[in-house]
Image (cartoon, grey):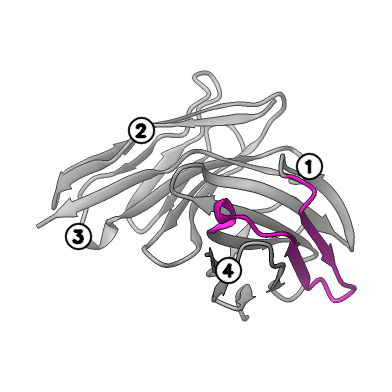
Amino acid sequence: KAGVTQTPRYLIKTRGQQVTLSCSPISGHRSVSWYQQTPGQGLQFLFEYFSETQRNKGNFPGRFSGRQFSNSRSEMNVSTLELGDSALYLCASSLWESEQYFGPGTRLTVT
Amino acid sequence: GDSVTQMEGPVTLSEEAFLTINCTYTATGYPSLFWYVQYPGEGLQLLLKATKADDKGSNKGFEATYRKETTSFHLEKGSVQVSDSAVYFCALSDRAGNQFYFGTGTSLTVIP
């Protein structure tokens, strides 16, 4: 079974731009979660989607948004990028009430 | 709310040394507990899990026991290898499995 895939793997953007990251979960997994990982803040929860509905949301500004499609694929969008948004963005998928499986992440650099 | 407190790092050990990474949790219900490992440049990989009190999770020589009385889930390995060098995260999920809570991560370096 294929694992969680994330695209692109690396991205360089300029302050003020917007970016969209994509995540394809493991086949059959309906829950997708997003995390931001930075050296200073560690692993921080962004949001979680299940069957196209956002069930949980972390403490991030409204510039961070996401969605999930009917095939469980998910995207997250960051608008008006700031230097502090430079991070590794991780996506994880899971079955109902089970462990999460992570993708390799998208490394976003904002200059 | 639910939370995980993890032993601060970094930890440096010689090959074949004994490893313990402490993890304690706070949860209102009966969470499931996990250890994840992250190698440089990669995402997190599930190392082991335990879903109820007194369960022992094990994988690749690593073990952790779900201790409800001490709200702990300490990670242990009897003899570490250089290839075990990575960052280790303790995590819990609430009863519904809706949300995961991660510790801050402990960096382990094993020297030959």
Whether B44 is drawn above or below A1: the answer is above
Label pair 3/2, CB-CB below 8 angstroms:
no
Give, as a three-letter code, the residue at label 2: Glu
For the residues beneath circles 2 and 4, the answer to whether they share a chain is: no
Direction from residue B66 to residue B32 in the image, left or right: right
Q: Which residue is mark 3?
A: B82
Q: CA distance from mark 3 to mark 1?
A: 37 Å
Label pair 2/4, CB-CB below 8 angstroms:
no
**Segment tinted magenta in the rendering:** A61-86
Q: Which residue is mark 2?
A: B8
Label pair 3/1, CB-CB below 8 angstroms:
no
Q: CA distance from mark 1 to mark 2?
A: 29 Å
Mark positioned earlier in the residue sequence (1 or 2): 2
Whether B112 is drawn above or below B5: the answer is below
Q: Secondary structure at mark 1?
A: loop
Q: Which mark is residue B96?
A: 1
Q: Chain of mark 1?
A: B
Q: CA distance from mark 3 to mark 2?
A: 20 Å
Residue B106 locus on image (x, y percent):
37, 42
Q: Secondary structure at mark 3?
A: helix
For the residues beneath circles 1 and 4, the answer to whether they share a chain is: no
Q: Give the quadrant of the N terminus of chain B.
A: top right
Give residue B21's quadrant in the image: top left
Q: Which residue is mark 4?
A: A103
Q: Secondary structure at mark 4?
A: loop
Q: CA distance from mark 1 to mark 4?
A: 22 Å
Give, as a three-letter code, the residue at label 1: Ala
